[in-house]
Image (tube, helix red, strand yellow):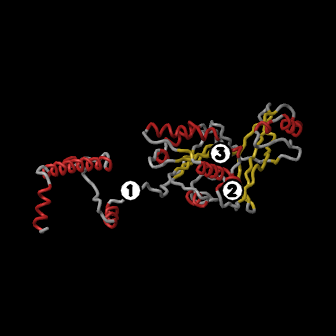
């Protein structure tokens, strides 16, 4: 077959409508392609403002190289939430007014005589009822009865802390002033001193949070119910501001209890601990992530409402509690002989 004949023979074998069918098929393929492309845009770019002709305003080219993608990220870096500790505000120090059960040493100078070996052994500075028990009154009646008549016993209590040979001693001094009722004459002034806690000034700090928690925290000193209520009130306040609730983190809670216990044991009230250093040093050494700390102290019983109100009335501490970027909290509230200690930790 001649080449030309073969060429024309193919043309002759196709019907005249072949060209029209091809055009219709081509237009149908284009229509389907455009429809699929529109679906691709909708799936890949939800919520974007459409550009001209319904196309997205911004769309990465499919053939963008890896280097171009890295350059684009460098120009528009992803904004990450900060993870560095934030500045700590001065602690909330709550002190009682003079009429709120604050116990003071008598203002007048006293020539004190220590109680002798006959003073009742059952007297305990941590149980105030024993300090004026019948046995104690009997001790003074026998000792001062020779003055005749009746007398009045005035009692005042003051805490004391002192150091000796690497140990910190907590004690209370109970001052007894005996006055004869007939003529108000002072017939005796005695003091009963009792050490109620000894604390090492160079404690063997453990390497783990669990170990340090077991070493330091006394379970019967923890006010768990008040801790829970404080967290609840905090989250209620955040909800009123449109903020998400903070989850209670067990490691932050344990660390907060350690800090509160440490303040009570070493008789200080500060973010800087003589035992652990700064809150962030303490957290880092015990393997806990920490962003900020609130602390509070009072010499009388604190309720959850008081703790919450005291923090919220302090602008810096309120800011910590209302920080949008925080997601977790730990509250540790410890009751010791010298007061109530509160620590809030955030991250």
Front-most of residues 306 and 43 = 43
* Residue wearing tag 2: 211
Q: Position of residue 97 (x, y in %)?
A: 59, 39
Give the secondary structure at mark 3. strand
Left or right placement of residue 49 versus residue 176 in this view: left
Q: Position of residue 299 (x, y in %)?
A: 64, 43
Determine whether 305 is above or below 263 in the image.
above
Q: For the residues marked 1 and 2, what is the alpha-carbon distance in whole angstroms?
A: 37 Å
* Residue wearing tag 3: 334
Q: Which mark is residue 259?
A: none
* 1 vs 2, front mark: 1
- Are dots 1 and 2 in contact, CB under 8 Å? no
Determine whether 148 is above or below 26 in the image.
above
* 3 vs 2, front mark: 2
Image quarter of residue 307 = top right
Image quarter of residue 6 = bottom left
- Are dots 3 and 2 in contact, CB under 8 Å? no
* Mark sitting earlier along the chain (1/2): 1
Q: Position of residue 225 (x, y in %)?
A: 63, 38
Residue drawn at point x = 82 percent, y = 48 percent: 114
* Mark sitting earlier along the chain (1/3): 1
Q: Position of residue 108 (x, y in %)?
A: 70, 44
Q: For the residues marked 3 and 2, what is the alpha-carbon distance in whole angstroms?
A: 18 Å
* Residue wearing tag 1: 79
Circle 1 residues within 10 Å: few <14, some 14–19, many ≥20: few
């Amino acid at each position: 077959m001649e080449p030309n004949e073969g060429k024309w023979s193919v043309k002759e074998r196709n019907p005249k409508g072949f060209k029209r069918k091809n055009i219709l098929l081509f237009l149908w393929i284009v229509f389907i392609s455009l429809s699929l492309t529109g679906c691709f845009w909708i799936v890949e770019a939800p919520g974007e403002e459409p550009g001209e002709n319904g196309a997205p305003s911004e769309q990465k080219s499919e053939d963008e190289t890896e280097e171009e993608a890295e350059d684009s990220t460098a120009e528009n870096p992803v904004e990450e939430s900060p993870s560095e500790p934030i500045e700590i505000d001065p602690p909330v120090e709550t002190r009682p007014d003079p009429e709120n059960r604050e116990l003071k040493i008598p203002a007048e100078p006293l020539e004190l005589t220590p109680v002798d070996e006959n003073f009742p052994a059952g007297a305990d500075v941590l149980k105030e009822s024993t300090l004026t028990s019948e046995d104690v009154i009997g001790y003074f009646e026998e000792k001062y009865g020779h003055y005749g008549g009746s007398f009045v016993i005035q009692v005042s209590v003051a805490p004391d802390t002192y150091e000796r040979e690497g140990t910190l001693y907590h004690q209370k001094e109970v001052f007894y002033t005996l006055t004869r009722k007939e003529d108000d004459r002072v017939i005796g002034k005695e003091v009963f001193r009792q050490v109620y806690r000894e604390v090492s000034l160079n404690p063997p700090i453990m390497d783990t949070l669990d170990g340090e928690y077991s070493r330091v925290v006394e379970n019967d000193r923890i006010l768990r119910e008040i801790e829970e209520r404080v967290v609840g009130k905090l989250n209620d306040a955040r909800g009123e501001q449109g903020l998400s609730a903070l989850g209670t983190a067990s490691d932050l809670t344990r660390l907060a209890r350690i800090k509160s216990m440490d303040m009570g044991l070493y008789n200080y009230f500060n973010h800087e601990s003589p035992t652990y250093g700064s809150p962030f040093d303490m957290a880092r050494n015990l393997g806990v992530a920490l962003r900020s700390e609130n602390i509070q102290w009072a010499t009388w019983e604190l309720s959850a409402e008081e703790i919450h109100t005291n923090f919220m009335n302090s602008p810096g501490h309120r800011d910590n509690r209302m920080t949008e970027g925080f997601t977790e909290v730990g509250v540790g509230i410890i009751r010791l002989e010298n007061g109530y200690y509160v620590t809030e930790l955030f991250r």
